[in-house]
Image (cartoon, coloured by chain):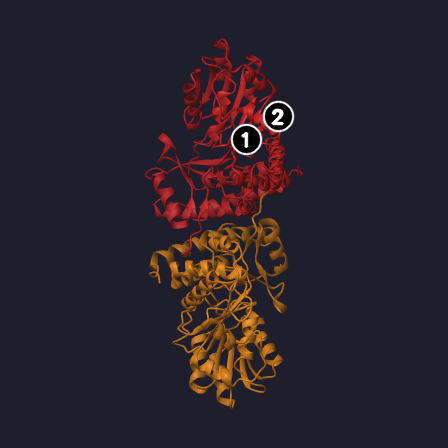
Chain colours: A orange, B red
């Protein structure tokens, strides 16, 4: 039997076909007029994708590189920062801040739970001087959506000078993030997520407050130097050799997103996530996330079945790549992505495959019941809400 | 919402991704050693795909070009031939034979029915001299499978000198066709079907008996001259400029089919067709074909609903392109392909979309019921039959 390889992982996600074709175009040299046009267009449309008037800087790196930039460019040795952590990527903020010698305070929630804005408020009130607050818009390891707006507003209110630093690598293009209105100082993105291109590019939007801070920040930086990249951008250039083919692909994807409308891209993920949650519950499976994100759905493996086997069988029987849990969640949950280039047909195909895999692993489920729940939810959502206008 | 364009038409079919990448490779000149290697490999692996020791000649043309070659190369003005026709492509044999001034006898079955081997037998016995018998392995316009083996054996028995000419454009790679054992003299194929590459190449397998006949055949021919192409093939060449990029893509697709195994390719279509038929019936829809082919499933539009609307809504709501009926069947049936690069996830996604489209058109159907029937059938088929060994 033919089994088409299909990614349902929350990054990398399926490539937009037009962007994929562009990736294979002949190489451009990065110091040419043609490529400067690509850079300018990327920088313009990235602002549209982020939904901000702030400058958006990119690096040739994974998302973690941009997270590192968010530490190295705005802080000085010994600065006290607060990290809200509730999963593997929250822990990454802690590791990064520690690696650079910051004084790290934490507000933790267990895996599967959202950060408590109240607890963050209390902690902010208790702590003295504080230079930054770090968290995720969406914690990809658990499928949880944190309340970015509340955390940002509380921080601004209690510690007006602290920078609000948001890892929105899976949050962008899947949830409303009003960077300007909520005064998010630093927001991180990655190419292999809702942007529908391969990994290799990371993004940082930087507020005026953050640029001011950068002037006095004393942590060492070289490759991930945001000011250097900003200066290069003013010359329609980059500080170092960029991943030219990825940028050529990204222009195409960003143009497509512009055409579709950012709100429609977000709504697409929201509808698919909502339908998937209904399917999962119709199969008597439990959602792992207390407050589920729309970028991905984390599902608890049913009692007696390891998500290792679900992951393996989805791939072997149907070519579908779902994500296992990470760290201590490995074997316990599996994750299904909705961000970027997915449509309803993808989701129901996946759900039908999941029903068969669970059945083959001995889980008693009603074949077709998940699909039916997704279909019914789709009718409700698509009938009740008109699509937002483009742009 | 994102709607991915997906072809479910019985040609063109979805491209094999590796072949698609090869199509975009830099151009080769057709009179070079590199391209001669491509030609030799295509010719070898085409024999494997056809499952014959006969020579397989290709043309740069649609399938109809190869059908024309099957007339022009083997017959002389006024030759009497029998055409078995039960649909649009049967009629094409009649048109072609008339265009070349042959004396055409017909055995007809109505659209949706298979050819009657008994009626063909009777007719063969009644007719005097007869130079050829023409029919389809699979009539793509109605989704009917004709009994190629019986028709071929009857012909050979009653008219040993008549050529058996089979349009297997959608039959190849979807049904057992034992060209050598059943003594099929001329068999036609096309690139945009089970071969998973775009339209533009057609194929003709030619038996020794047919090559003998070609020597004395007096119909005019130039571009579609099989003997000229055979001579060119012996020089690792083609008579005229070939569609080089399609051939480069075809090599990749043929290699993949060789790796998968011809029997597995056929079984893939058979399993998907079987599951789809179960889904269709679970939705209380009627199959149009009396003897359904596995290349495609033709479904009757339910009472009061035009298949024009089904075709339109599948595309508008879900990006899925199904085929309407052709000719007098337009508006009455729709057709879903299984040939080539499809997998189970494709089919259940399509069925779920179809359920929603039918519901939106006012047809009362049990959401998820078609998917469930396909899933149950899939379990039966995949559990009960081991995959044939490769090669």
**Other residues around mark 1 within 10 Å, as few (<14) / some (14–19) / many (≥20):** many
Q: How many marks?
A: 2
Query: In x, y percent, where is residue A155?
Result: 45, 83
Q: Which quarter shows the N terminus of chain B? A: bottom left
Query: In x, y percent, where is residue B240?
Result: 52, 31
Foreground residue, B32 or B310? B32
Q: Which residue is mark 2?
A: B54
Residue B322 in view of the camera: yes
Q: Secondary structure at mark 1?
A: strand
Q: Secondary structure at mark 2?
A: loop
Query: In x, y percent, where is residue B391?
Result: 66, 36
**Other residues around mark 2 within 10 Å, as few (<14) / some (14–19) / many (≥20):** some
Residue A361 in view of the camera: no
Residue sitting farthest toward the bottom = A128
The disc numbered 1 marks a residue on which chain? B
Residue B174, picture quadrant: top right
Distance from disc 1 to disc 2, alpha carbons, whole Å, reads 13 Å
Q: Nearer the viewer, mark 1 or mark 2?
A: 1
Foreground residue, B342 or A43? A43
Do marks 1 and 2 share a chain? yes
Q: Residue at 36% x, 35% y: name it.
A: B332
Q: Is residue B258 above or below residue A34?
A: above
Q: Which residue is mark 1?
A: B58
Q: Is residue B244 above or below residue A154?
A: above
Q: Residue at 48% x, 58% y: name it.
A: A276
């Amino acid at each position: 039997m033919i089994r088409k390889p299909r990614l349902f992982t929350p990054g990398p996600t399926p490539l937009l076909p037009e962007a994929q074709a562009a990736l294979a175009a002949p190489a451009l040299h990065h110091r040419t007029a043609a490529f400067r046009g690509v850079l300018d267009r990327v920088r313009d449309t990235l602002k549209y994708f982020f939904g901000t008037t702030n400058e958006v800087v990119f690096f040739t790196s994974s998302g973690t590189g941009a997270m590192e930039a968010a530490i190295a460019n705005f802080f000085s040795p010994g600065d006290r920062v607060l990290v809200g952590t509730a999963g593997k990527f929250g822990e990454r903020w802690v590791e990064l801040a520690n690696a650079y010698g910051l004084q790290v305070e934490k507000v933790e929630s267990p895996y599967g739970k959202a950060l408590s804005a109240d607890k963050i408020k209390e902690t902010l009130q208790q702590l003295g001087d504080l230079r930054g607050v770090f968290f995720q818009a969406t914690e990809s390891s658990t499928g949880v959506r944190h309340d970015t707006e509340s955390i940002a507003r509380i921080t601004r209110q209690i510690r007006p000078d602290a920078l609000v630093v948001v890892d929105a690598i899976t949050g962008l293009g899947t949830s409303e993030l009003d960077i300007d209105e909520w005064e998010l100082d630093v927001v991180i993105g990655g190419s292999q997520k809702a942007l529908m291109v391969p990994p290799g590019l990371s993004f940082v939007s930087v507020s005026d407050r953050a640029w001011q801070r950068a002037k006095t920040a004393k942590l060492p930086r070289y490759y991930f130097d945001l000011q250097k990249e900003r200066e290069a951008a003013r010359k329609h250039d980059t500080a170092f050799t960029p991943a030219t083919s990825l940028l050529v692909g990204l222009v195409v994807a960003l143009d497509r997103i512009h055409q579709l409308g950012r709100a429609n891209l977000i709504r697409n993920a929201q509808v698919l996530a909502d339908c998937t949650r209904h399917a999962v519950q119709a199969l008597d499976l439990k959602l792992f996330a207390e407050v589920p994100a729309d970028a991905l759905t984390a599902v608890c493996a049913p009692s007696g079945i390891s998500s290792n086997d679900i992951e393996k069988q989805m791939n072997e029987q149907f070519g579908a790549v779902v994500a296992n849990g990470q760290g201590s969640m490995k074997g316990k949950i599996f994750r299904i992505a909705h961000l970027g280039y997915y449509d309803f047909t993808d989701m129901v195909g996946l759900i039908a495959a999941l029903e068969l895999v669970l059945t083959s692993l001995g889980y008693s489920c009603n074949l077709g019941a998940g699909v039916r729940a997704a279909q019914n939810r789709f009718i409700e959502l698509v009938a009740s809400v008109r699509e937002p206008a483009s742009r």
